[in-house]
Image (cartoon, coloured by chain):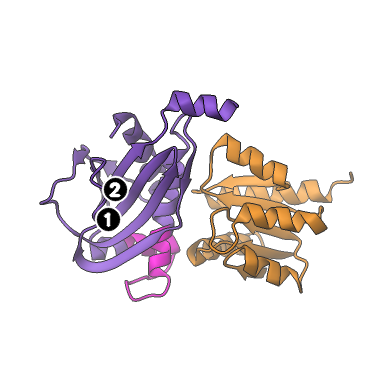
Chain colours: A orange, B purple
């Protein structure tokens, strides 16, 4: 399974990579902002995206909307400090499949990833 | 500064350091920052905008910043490491983001983090709001959370605005 991590903090990407490694996922792509992510998506089609909200150049919510213009299926989990209900609703409306609020434990993140992938694999 | 905004920062700093740095934080009595306060060696700064304006600053002595950043990142980070500022900025980001969710009825945006590294610096904030210092103690050493904010829109007005 190929996973694209989009977060302007390399520390957070490293923490996410460690969690993914613990789950047996080592095929990881990285981007530091929405624009960089779109560039990666030009040549790759990951099986899952973890996307931060607040990033320079292009934020996560804009990225999600752009991805959803062409790809309704790719599972996307928003991983962000934005915890207000209104933000969660906005992200769900934009097309994210799941939502993780920072700070997060490795257990929470892996649980949300498993949950999201099971739903994506389930027949419609 | 409205005292109702202090508790969200106390909860946020405990939650963030407990979850991401695996360290407990005991919080001392908040006080107003005066001119003769101690300076810091490392500061993570987040601006607040929207229904409130201001900034949140996490200020550390150098050694404490290195220990906390290392525990957060899971690897040795000193101030010269390319990921050091990133780790400090992300801690400040999570504290500000986590606190603002508890500002009932107010819509607040947070800026991307800025990090200042330099022995004995001070961060000056707008004089329009008193600057509150929340002293924090961890097993890895002490640091301060400094908050200066002005409510631009009262919660009741914000709630009405959100409903329209």
Residue B72 is covered by the magenta coloring: yes
| Mark 1 Cα shell of 10 Å, populated few (<14), some (14-19), many (≥20) | many
Asked whether residue A35 appears in the rendered view, the answer is: yes
Quarter of the picture containing the C terminus of chain B is top right
Which residue is outermost to the right? A123
Circle 2 — which element? strand
The reply, left or right, for residue B157 in relation to residue A93 is left
Which residue is drawn at the image coordinates 73% and 68% (left, top)? Answer: A41
The chain to which mark 2 is attached is: B
Provide the residue span drawn in magenta: B67-89
The reply, left or right, for residue B162 in relation to residue A77 is left
Circle 1 — which element? strand
Residue labelled with disc 2: B145
Which residue is drawn at the image coordinates 34% and 59% (left, top)? Answer: B68
The chain to which mark 1 is attached is: B
- Name the foreground residue: B163 vs A80: B163
| Mark 2 Cα shell of 10 Å, populated few (<14), some (14-19), many (≥20) | many
Asked whether residue B21 appears in the rendered view, the answer is: no
Q: Are marks 1 and 2 in contact (CB under 8 Å)?
A: yes
Which residue is drawn at the image coordinates 38% and 67% (left, top)? Answer: B85
* Residue A8, placed above or below residue A98: below
Which residue is drawn at the image coordinates 38% and 68% (left, top)? Answer: B84
Q: Position of residue A47 (x, y in %)?
A: 76, 61
- Name the foreground residue: B80 vs B54: B54
The reply, left or right, for residue B24 in relation to residue B102 is left
Gap between marks 1 and 2 measured at Cα:
6 Å
Query: What mark, if any, has residue B41 been given in the picture?
Result: none
Residue labelled with disc 1: B59
């Amino acid at each position: 399974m190929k996973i694209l991590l989009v977060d302007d903090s390399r520390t957070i990407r490293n923490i996410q990579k460690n969690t993914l490694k613990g789950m047996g996922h080592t095929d990881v792509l990285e981007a530091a902002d929405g624009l960089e992510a779109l560039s990666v998506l030009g040549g790759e089609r990951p099986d899952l995206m973890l996307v931060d909200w607040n990033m320079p150049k292009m934020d996560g919510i804009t990225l999600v909307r752009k991805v959803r213009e062409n790809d309704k299926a790719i599972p996307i989990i928003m991983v962000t400090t934005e915890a207000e209900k209104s933000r969660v609703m906005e992200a769900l409306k934009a097309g994210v499949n799941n939502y993780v609020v920072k700070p997060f434990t490795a257990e929470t993140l892996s649980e949300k990833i498993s949950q999201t992938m099971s739903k994506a694999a389930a027949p419609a | 500064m409205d005292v109702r905004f202090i508790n969200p920062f106390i909860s946020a700093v405990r939650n963030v350091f407990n979850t991401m740095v695996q360290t407990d934080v005991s919080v001392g009595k908040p006080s107003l920052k005066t001119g003769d306060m101690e300076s810091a060696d490392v500061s993570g700064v987040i601006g607040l905008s929207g229904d409130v304006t201001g900034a949140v600053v996490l200020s550390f002595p150098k050694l404490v910043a290195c220990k906390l950043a290392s525990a957060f990142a899971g690897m040795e980070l000193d101030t010269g490491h390319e990921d050091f500022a990133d780790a400090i900025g992300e801690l400040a980001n999570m504290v500000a983001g986590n606190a603002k969710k508890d500002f009932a009825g107010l819509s607040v945006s947070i800026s991307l983090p800025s990090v200042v590294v330099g022995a004995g610096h001070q961060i000056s904030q707008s004089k329009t709001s008193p600057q509150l210092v929340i002293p924090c103690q961890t097993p890895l050493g002490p640091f301060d959370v400094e908050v200066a904010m002005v409510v631009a829109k009262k919660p009741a007005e914000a709630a009405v605005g959100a409903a329209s």
